Amino acid sequence: MNKISLHAEGISDVTIVPNIFIDQFMPSANGAYVKVYLYLLRCFLGNCPEVTISSIADRLDNTEKDIIRALNYWEKLDLLTLTRNRNKEITSIKLADLGSMPRDKEEEPAPAMNSEWDTELDEVAVTIHTEVKPATRQAYSAEKISQLSNNDEIKWALHIVEIYLDRPLKPMDLQLILYLYEELHFSAELIMYLYEYCVSKGKKNASYIEAVALSWAEEGIDTEEKAKEAVSAYSDHFNTVNKAFGLNRAPGQIERQYIRKWVEVFSFPDDIITEACNRTILRTGKPDFKYTDRILETWFKKKVTNMKDILRLDEEFSRGNRPSENKVSQTAKASGNKFNQFPQRTYTAQDYAELEKKLLNKSL
């Protein structure tokens, strides 16, 4: 992995987070993306080890793809500039001076996310699959936008979206909606539900809405019904794990990957996942996702499909670890002394004669 050189404009010798980042960019950004940006700010102090995509991923407990997605996201918002070599590997990262960046006065700041953990779970359920790649969208002409506005199906959707956003649509809104309709092939109903969902989570920012739309598109969600099923299904799985572990927060990114593995790869129902979580708490005393994953992987390899299979495995394990009655009885017969637990050797007359000869020679 190649080394990446870092450059910055307006970065001081302490880690300072500009207010414009907190006010204008952070509310609509994925939490993992925010971690990457903050870590880059810290690295410009010069106290970080050699910077590579791999080292950043290890430091933040993310995958390299996650780090690259985060960098592409911030580059798209002009918060940094990436330089790549012929192999398209990132060789340089240059942070923009946010102090000189004008504030977007028209764009209202995104409301703070509801602090209730179940609301967070609902939001995470939509973006469980994080293979979201920044899209390079073409700028649609005024003629194309006018054509869109005259489509009866879309005209109604635009009206509903205005109601959800509680303001007149801006040119950027029209560009995004046209992209959803023309490029992602979202139906008018799906577009309306997309905005309904995002606004219900306190998210009216266009970048957030686009990110959710891209995640849906990658999952093959092309109808309102499929979107509602995706939201509901993963919310239920997250609630199951959090209840079993006694967690009062949304699962982190790595934890979401584990849950996705248990549900999609292992195809375990919630009762089996709950049982694994309960056993984890009993044996470790804490919510350990890695330990639970080992339990579920063992059950998966042993073709467990229901609770009866688990009880059968428990019984087999118990029988396999039970002391053999024959071994116990043989030991007891050999000696009533608890120290006599080793295999006993049988000595012949010749053995005793040789031993006696050795003792006599030694005494002489």
Image: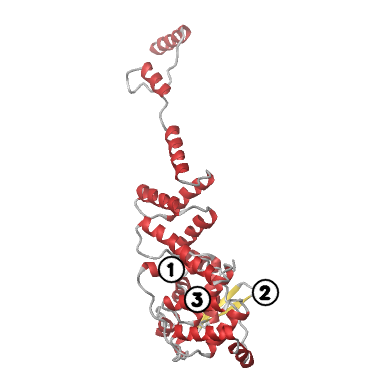
Q: Residue at x 39, y 48 (%)?
A: 279
User: Could you give the CA–CA distance between mark 2 and mark 1, rounded to whole angstroms?
Assistant: 41 Å
Any mark on residue 86, and which?
A: 2
Q: Front-most of 246 and 11?
A: 246
Residue 68 in view, yes or no: no
Q: Which residue is mark 3?
A: 193
Q: Residue at x 33, y 23 (%)?
A: 338
Q: Residue furthest left?
A: 337
The location of residue 280, given as percent across then percent down, is: 39, 50
Q: Residues within 10 Å of mark 2 (few under 14, many from 20)?
A: few
Q: Residue at x 46, y 10 (%)?
A: 351
Q: Front-most of 348 and 339?
A: 339
Quarter of the picture containing the C terminus is top left
The location of residue 121, given as percent across then percent down, is: 42, 67
Quarter of the picture containing the N terminus is bottom right
Q: In front of the other: label 3 or label 1?
A: 3
User: Could you give the CA–CA distance between mark 3 and mark 2, rounded to whole angstroms?
Assistant: 42 Å
Q: Front-most of 154 and 34?
A: 154
